Amino acid sequence: MIAININGKKETLDEEISLLEFLNAKNIDLNAVVIEYNFEVIDRTSWQEIVLKAADNLEILHFVGGG
């Protein structure tokens, strides 16, 4: 098991998985978020290549519309 931080809260994963697999498992709308990985905004083309490891930090920022 590995522990990562997501939006300031600890979460435990059973194993290392790609960022894309994690987002899909959480049913996150991939077209409506920006991801900050270890304090750096990353391009969505990198999501499959990034493997989440112990002590990683994720901020998942959702787009919100208004008017």
Image (cartoon, rainbow, N blue to C red):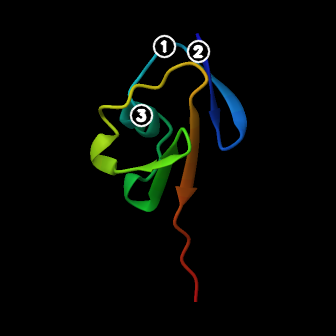
Locate the C terminus by quadrant: bottom right
SS assignment at label 3: helix
Which amino acid type corresponds to the residue marked 3 in the rendered image? Leu
Instruction: Give me the disc on residue 19.
Output: 3
Instruction: Give me the disc on residue 2.
Output: 2
Check whether the beta carbons of the residues at disc 1 and disc 3 lie within 8 A of each other: no
SS assignment at label 1: loop
Locate the N terminus by quadrant: top right
Which amino acid type corresponds to the residue marked 2 in the rendered image? Ile
Q: Earlier in the sequence, mark 1 or mark 2?
A: 2
Q: Name the residue under label 1.
A: 15
At a point 35% along the width and 40% down the height, the residue shown is 47
CA–CA distance between discs 2 and 3?
Answer: 14 Å
CA–CA distance between discs 1 and 2?
Answer: 6 Å
- Tell me where residue 61 appears, x and y as whole percent: 55, 56
Q: How crowded is mark 2: few (under 14 residues within 10 Å), some or many (20 or more)?
A: some
Question: Is 4 on the left or on the right of 31, as rendered?
Answer: right
From the viewer's perspective, is residue 47 above or below residue 14? below
Question: Is 51 on the left or on the right of 63, as rendered?
Answer: left
SS assignment at label 2: strand
At a point 50% along the width and 38% down the height, the residue shown is 26
CA–CA distance between discs 1 and 3?
Answer: 12 Å
Which amino acid type corresponds to the residue marked 1 in the rendered image? Glu
User: Closer to the camera, 50 or 13?
Assistant: 50
